[in-house]
């Protein structure tokens, strides 16, 4: 649990940081991150780069499950039922959804 002195110190530090952010534009600068794929003159973020194979924790089943989850979203069901309600046959509705995926 935080003591009142520790809480007061954290509050003061947050207030100082906010004051600096509001008055000094240089406080918003971030250090340039190194990239394994982006050219040296391009700013990038490690979260936007592909995960290296040695750090991947998923397999084929996770890949299939991820894409299958797209089939059970409300937008897929809504668009399918709207097409079906407009008078198009079930087969044509099914083929339309397969064609757009």
Image (cartoon, rainbow, N blue to C red):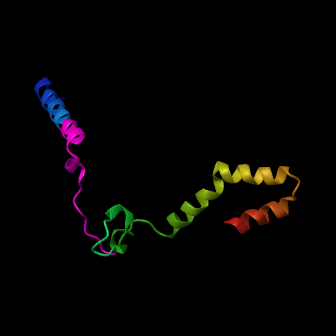
What segment is highlighted magenta in the picture?
A: 17-37
In the displayed structure, 71 sits above or below 3; it is below
Outermost residue toward the left in this view: 5
| Residue 66 part of the magenta-drawn span | no
| Residue 33 part of the magenta-drawn span | yes
Quadrant including the N terminus: top left
Q: Is residue 72 left or right of residue 10?
A: right
In the displayed structure, 78 sits above or below 69; it is above
Q: Would you identify the image quadrant in which residue 24 lies?
A: top left
Number of marks present in the image shown: 0
In the displayed structure, 68 sits above or below 8; it is below
Q: At 70% across and 65% down in the image, what residue appears?
A: 100
Q: 95 or 37: which is nearer to us? A: 37
Q: At 20% across and 50% down in the image, what residue appears?
A: 26
Q: At 58% across and 63% down in the image, what residue appears?
A: 67
Q: 9 or 44: which is nearer to us? A: 44
Residue 22, x across and y down, in percent: 24, 39
In the displayed structure, 35 sits above or below 87; it is below
């Amino acid at each position: 649990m935080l003591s009142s002195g520790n809480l007061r110190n954290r509050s003061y530090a947050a207030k100082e940081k906010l004051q600096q952010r509001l008055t000094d534009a240089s406080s918003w600068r971030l250090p340039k991150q190194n990239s394994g794929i982006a050219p040296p003159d391009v700013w990038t973020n490690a979260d936007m780069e592909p995960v290296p194979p040695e750090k991947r924790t998923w397999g084929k089943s996770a890949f299939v499950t991820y894409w299958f989850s797209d089939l059970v979203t409300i937008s897929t069901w809504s668009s399918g039922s709207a097409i079906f309600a407009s008078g198009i046959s079930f087969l044509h509705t099914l083929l339309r959804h397969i064609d757009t995926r």
